[in-house]
Amino acid sequence: MVPNISDIDVANPGVKMDSLGSISVFVQAAETRSFTEAGRLQGVSSSAIGKSIARLEARLGVRLFHRSTRSITLTAEGALFLERCRKILAEVEAAEFELCNAASAPHGKLRISLPQVHDLVMPVLIEFMALYPQIELDLDLTDRMVDVVDEGFDAVIRTGKPKDSRLMARPLGEFHLVLVASAVYLDQHGAPQIPADLADHACLRHTFHATGKLEAWPLRREEGSAEPVLPTRLVSTSIEAVSHAALAGMGIACLPDFMVAEAVRQGRLRRVLDAYVEHDGQFWVLWPSSRHAAAKLRVFIDHISQRLFPAKDGR
């Protein structure tokens, strides 16, 4: 495995720490933003971590951290070095695990965070469980934006463009938000022809659990027109609850196309205002770049990439 600082004689100033070990210590300190916490994780004192970083800085000829009595922050050079170091450690650990696990089936626990779109993800995950019976899945189904690294997740599935530089990412497939209502509702209340018509309809809204903010409807506005009024009949942190209310004829909802495709095909839901809805979304699988790509994680990433949107990626 990657050398641990506790395996090296840090008390002897005449001993030069090997490059891989010092890189591991640097990444630990950078990710925890604390010599003390890095020392706790490595099983040594904070002063040992500080001396290790100082020797690395001397060897490189650059300052990697700004230090104060209360905190450490990366310098510009330190931030650049961190990205390279994460990739180096990931490659080394991946190589080790490929050799160690080559003869054994993928096994162990995977802690995964996924959005609350059960009908989309659960069939794929159940298929995965059947294929890999020695892998235990620990699922966190939530729309909360978890911290993948700090909360110890092996991987997460999320929408939107990845922004965390600590994570690796692979696109899974695209989706679009659409406005829908049941045939019964539209027969009773009529279909809106322009966004302004929504003022005369019951709107079923999704709200983000973490912030309490309503999810905006991606409606194109004509030049000079006001933002449409959306009279709210239902607000829910569960997008599936919104879908159930729409199917029951309670109003108009804004939902992902994959969630309503079958109901639209069967005629239970109808799409409205398509000419005014503008949205392109994408699902991603994300995992820590500094974590080894163990066999259990590799097969999960490959499976979810191939199976979540098979019709859209040609597989």
Image: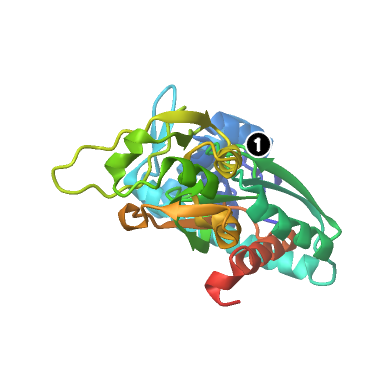
Query: Hey, which residue is sitting farthest front in the picture?
Result: 188
Q: Position of residue 1 (x, y in %)?
A: 71, 57
Say if residue 86 shows up in the picture.
no
Residue annotated with mark 1: 41
Q: Which residue: 82% across, 58% down?
A: 107
Say if residue 116 shows up in the picture.
yes
Circle 1: residue type: Leu
Q: Nearer the viewer, residue 248 or 11?
A: 248
Q: Position of residue 132 (x, y in %)?
A: 82, 62
The quadrant where residue 243 appears: top right
Q: Is residue 215 above or below residue 128?
A: above
Query: Hey, which residue is sitting farthest bottom in the picture?
Result: 314
Q: Is residue 24 left or right of residue 181?
A: right
Task: Report crowding for label 1: few under 14, some 14 to 19, many 20 or more residues within 10 A (C-alpha).
Answer: some
Q: Position of residue 176 (x, y in %)?
A: 45, 57
Q: Position of residue 188 (x, y in %)?
A: 47, 41
Please state, as top left, top right, bottom left or bottom right, where the C terminus lies in the image. bottom right
Q: Nearer the viewer, residue 228 or 290?
A: 228
Q: Which residue: 55% across, 39% down?
A: 242
Q: Which residue: 86% across, 59% down?
A: 133
Q: Nearer the viewer, residue 178 or 145?
A: 178
